[in-house]
Amino acid sequence: MALVQIQETPHWKKVLSYIGPGFLVSVAYLDPGNLETDLQAGADYKYELLWIVLVGLGFALVIQSRSANLGVATGKHLSQHCRTEYHTPINYCLWILAEIAVIAADIPEVIGTAFALNILFNVPIWSGVLLAGLNTLLLLGLQRYGIRKLEIAIGILVLVVGGCFCSVMVHANPNVKEIARGMFLPKLSNASATRDSIALLGALIMPHNLFLHPALVTSRKIHRSVDGIRSASRYFLLESGLALLIAFLINVAVISVSGSVCSNPNISSNNKYHCTNVTLNSAALLLKNALGNWSSKLYAISLLASGQSSTVTGTYAGQYIMQGFLDLKMKLWLRNLVTRCIAIAPSLIACIIGGPSAAARLIIIASMILSFELPFALVPLLKFTSSEAKMREHKNSIMVSLILWFLGACSIGINIYFLGSTLLGWITSDHTPKATAIITCVAISPVIILYILMLLYLTFKPQIPSTDSPDSGMSPDESLESESTRETDSYGIQRAVEIEM
């Protein structure tokens, strides 16, 4: 594996050498599912929930920094640690759950791309799903030229999303003072706002991101000394902070657009109807009616960029998950094809059978699956980064560990609440027959018990002492050479090339 060479001097080149992994990770906070949640939050509560996005992305920065530290300090990513830590049956369960999470995360991304193609070129939704898969494979072909090319491409797509929504926001002319108030003065006006804020928080952290980030940072050639690892961790923290700041500003722009349009006192009855149930498809009609046809086109372009960038990183995460859990050696193009076909299958079936409405419902189901899946990536991450056996002197301090476990428990609680309230709302609905509700409760009960038992096992299982030390006593050059050879032998994949400044 050819690693990205860190340019030590001048300082600005060193900083640029670290930029990339955080931007690939940040697109998960800008995927079509998040855009839909943001648009609905703005339509329902104007700018009231902006502080929720600020808190959520602040928490995301803390979690992603720990995720990056795991890769920097150990030279291994999360799924590799899971394979060595847990017994084979548990390892396979975690792998299956991680793969399901990748597929669930990919559903809104593929559907979002299909909607964008439909808005821009009148392409049928089911054809758009196929084109989304094909385009992603072509974009992933940039891997053969090194990870830096892919990072640049994703960075450009992120800027396209931000540029389009900022342009629409300027035309929508939201109240800046109200935006600032919503961002820094916490407020939840009613129970519905509380429920939607929980859904908004639950949609932010994606399980596959926790597998992807530690794998991406291993593409940098760093000194394996204690100071070298600490220095790299600081730079990756700054880089992740910058990427998530951009993601936060784009989320603010999305909420501000729908908040401004739907709170307009002169809103038409047709637009008022669309504001009550904003979907990726209906948002284009809303913007077209309120701001003009050009705004819906800009929205579609941003949706296309969001969907493509998110599907690329989702597929990339799937590769690392497969490698780490199974140590599976597969040709790069074949692994891409398998991952992509598995991911687009549910979206394609839903679009062919039920059309756009079924695709929109599938996005809701995908968000529930992700809420269910998150703890199985978050708990191992928090446990490994707090472990001296894994991290040595780079482990979390006691105070940081307590904060992380508290935040992790809050995040898991939020997601379980979102999942439970959604299921309970469906079961107790007047449209659900009593017999169906009873059967559903009986079927779900064993799953809930198994879910809790597995989380307890992951949390309290004693750590296996690590045989690999982040600082093995070798010189930096020897350690780098050894690591590079080991990775190449394991996977035979060129993940990166040296930076040429």
Image (cartoon, rainbow, N blue to C red):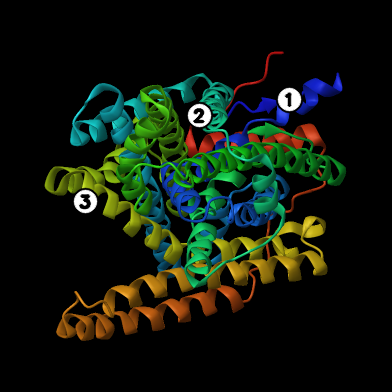
Q: Does 354 sit above or below residue 461?
A: above
Q: Which mark is nearer the camera, 1 or 3?
A: 3
Q: Amino acid at mark 1?
A: Leu
Q: Amino acid at mark 2?
A: Val
Q: Name the residue: 79% across, 55% down.
A: 394
| Residue closer to the observer: 158 or 104 | 158
Between circles 2 and 3, the one closer to the viewer is 2
Could you tell me which secondary element the residue under label 2 belongs to?
A: helix
Rate crowding at label 1 as few (under 14), some (14 to 19) or many (20 or more) other CA atoms within 10 Å.
Answer: some
Q: Which of the two residues, 120 or 112, is positioned nearer the viewer here?
A: 120
Residue at the disc numbered 2 = 168
How far apart are the alpha carbons under marks 1 and 3?
43 Å
Instruction: For label 3, count other residues whose C-alpha is less than 10 Å away and answer few (under 14), some (14-19) or many (20+).
Output: some
Assign a secondary structure to mark 1.
helix
Q: Is residue 358 left or right of residue 272?
A: left
Question: Residue under circle 1?
Answer: 16
